[in-house]
Image (cartoon, rainbow, N blue to C red):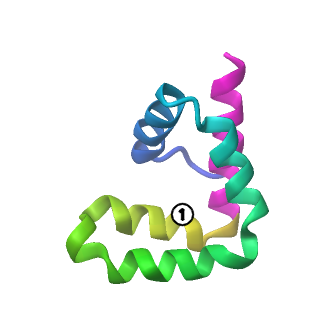
Amino acid sequence: MHRLRAEWVTWADHLRHLNLADWFAWLLEASAPFVLLGAQALFIARPLLGEQSEALADLLEDEEARHAFAAYLREEELR
């Protein structure tokens, strides 16, 4: 199992606040063919978007991390 990353807690809190956690978890798993393109776009946009974009790009590139974060989002929704 993947180690819980500090930014995951922040991201999950924001997604839950916006009622988008379930949707984002589904998106992470359903959009597998496109996530590498999204990750590359985030790496390119890092100077404009800041360090969080790099952390999100890293998440998108790592299939195991994507599934772990999606599971984390779903767990948080059950509480």
The residue pinned by badge 1 equals 59
The location of residue 19, given as percent across then percent down, is 57, 29
Label 1: which secondary element: helix
Residue 1 visible in rendering: no
Question: Which residue is at 21% across, 76% downward?
Answer: 47
Tag 1: Cα neighbours inside 10 Å, few (<14), some, or many (≥20)?
Answer: many
Q: Is residue 79 left or right of residue 6?
A: right
Q: Residue at x 46, y 31 (%)?
A: 13
Task: Say if the magenta span includes residue 69.
Answer: yes
Judge from the rendering whether residue 22 lies leftward or rightward of residue 8; answer left or right. right
Query: In the rendering, at what x and y percent does residue 76 appear?
Result: 63, 26
Is residue 72 located in the magenta-colored stretch of the structure?
A: yes
Decide: is 21 above or below 68: above
Rendered view: 59 above or below 38: above
Query: On the rendered image, what quadrant is the C terminus found in?
Result: top right
Across and down, in percent, residue 38 comes to 53, 75
Span of residues in magenta: 64-79
Image point 68% across, 46% down: which residue? 25
User: Who is closer to the viewer here, 1 or 19?
Assistant: 19
